[in-house]
Amino acid sequence: MSDGSLSQDEIDALLQGGGGFDFGGEESAGQTPVGLSQEQQMAFASKLSGAVSSQASNLSGIIGKSVNIGKPEVEFMTRDGFVGTAPEQLVVTSIGFSEGIVGEHMYLMPVNLATAIAGLMMGQEQIDLDEAALSALSEAGNTLAGAIATTLGDAVRKTVMTTPGETEILSRDDISLPGDGFLRVSYPVTIEGEKPSQLMEVFSISAVSDVVKPQQASPSPGVQPSSQMGAMGQGMMGGGMQQQMPQGMSMSYQQPPNVQSVQFPNLYPQAAAGDQGNIGLLMDVYMEMTVELGRTKRLIREILGMGEGTIIELDKLAGEPVDILVNHKLIAKGEVVVIDENFGVRVTEIVSPMERMSDLT
């Protein structure tokens, strides 16, 4: 260019080429979300990167396997662009933002990734994505969204609340997506012992705007900026105040006061690094483990009448697995064995998280 300046297209190309984030491929080249600049997209992607380790740690904690989540790739998409590139069938967990920031938000994962996560949560290798499995995936989505809400809450200095997750299996044509375009975030996910896959996250433009757009601070009533006060003083000095003062009276002009807005300290609690996922700190804590052969109920007079030789019938059948409890909570079942001269238990079944949850209700 003759004047040495860059065109807007060249500036956008430079922004898309830097920052370490992907802002769209061939499908969305040149598309910019309404009301969002490239700089704001880059800022949002940077904030999401800060939540990756927390998301991986949270997911690892509930499935009991090592999880690695890679760098997020952020892309503006329309519904038509998404339908043209997404898998034919997806598992969708909708978790909207209801407080602090407001907008639509959801996780989308291919069926194989959803099956692997649900199976690990329920302690089963081969499962169908039935109601129990979808409920487990909703819990996994809530756990992931918790890390995102904490990170975005730090950014806006507000408490960000989410709605409870709802999970369903949908074809790509039936997914309810934000109407005026949205940001799709893609994460490469690797779970220990499973094939690499990809997790997608969708944010409506309104939710992103609440995070990246600066908050306009309204001036306090009755207080004028110092620049305006200075201009007022100059106007008075050079205008009507040039009239002569009555004899014997004098007026001294003082420098206009420098009025500045009050800066309050940040009262939003900052999450300390490593607060989440430090279950290793508890590994040396002892817990009581009990093996329960069975139970029964007896009247007080029957208990008082017990003596040597009394036989007590339990509620378990002969050969039925015994219960293994930790701190009086059922975690597994097994069969009694003899080790040298001591009794032992061989674990035959691990109780799934869903069964443990049903026992609490």
Image (spheres, helix red, strand yellow):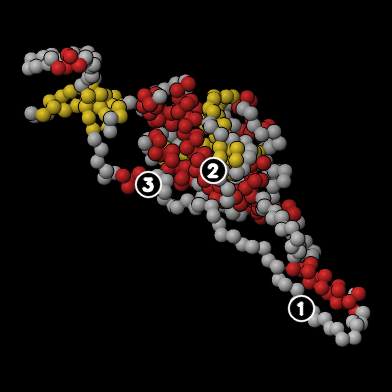
Query: Closer to the N terminus: mark 1 or mark 2?
Result: 2
| Residue 251 visible, this orientation | yes
- In the picture shown, does residue 280 fall above or below 178? below
- Residue at disc 1, secondary structure: loop
| Residue 105 visible, this orientation | no
Give residue 215's position: percent from left, percent from top. 67, 52
Query: Closer to the N terminus: mark 1 or mark 3?
Result: 1
> Which of the 4 image quadrants contains residue 73?
top right
Give residue 322's position: percent from left, percent from top. 23, 22
Neighbours of disc 2 within 10 Å: few (<14), some (14-19), many (20+): many
Residue 278's disc is: 3
Going by the image, does 333 lie left or right of 94?
Answer: left
Neighbours of disc 3 within 10 Å: few (<14), some (14-19), many (20+): few
Residue 149's disc is: 2
Of the 4 image quadrants, the one containing the N terminus is bottom right
How far separated are the C-alphas under marks 2 and 3? 19 Å
For the residue marked with disc 1, what is the amino acid?
A: Gln
Query: Closer to the N terminus: mark 2 or mark 3?
Result: 2
How far separated are the C-alphas under marks 1 and 2? 51 Å
Q: Report the residue marked by disc 1.
A: 254
For the residue marked with disc 3, what is the amino acid?
A: Asn
Name which residue lies at 50% across and 40% down.
Answer: 146
Going by the image, does 133 lie left or right of 179?
Answer: left
Neighbours of disc 1 within 10 Å: few (<14), some (14-19), many (20+): few
> Which of the 4 image quadrants contains residue 185?
top right
- Residue at disc 2, secondary structure: helix
- In the picture shown, does residue 240 fall above or below 260? below
Given contact means CB atoms under 8 Å apart, are the residues at marks 1 and 3 in contact? no
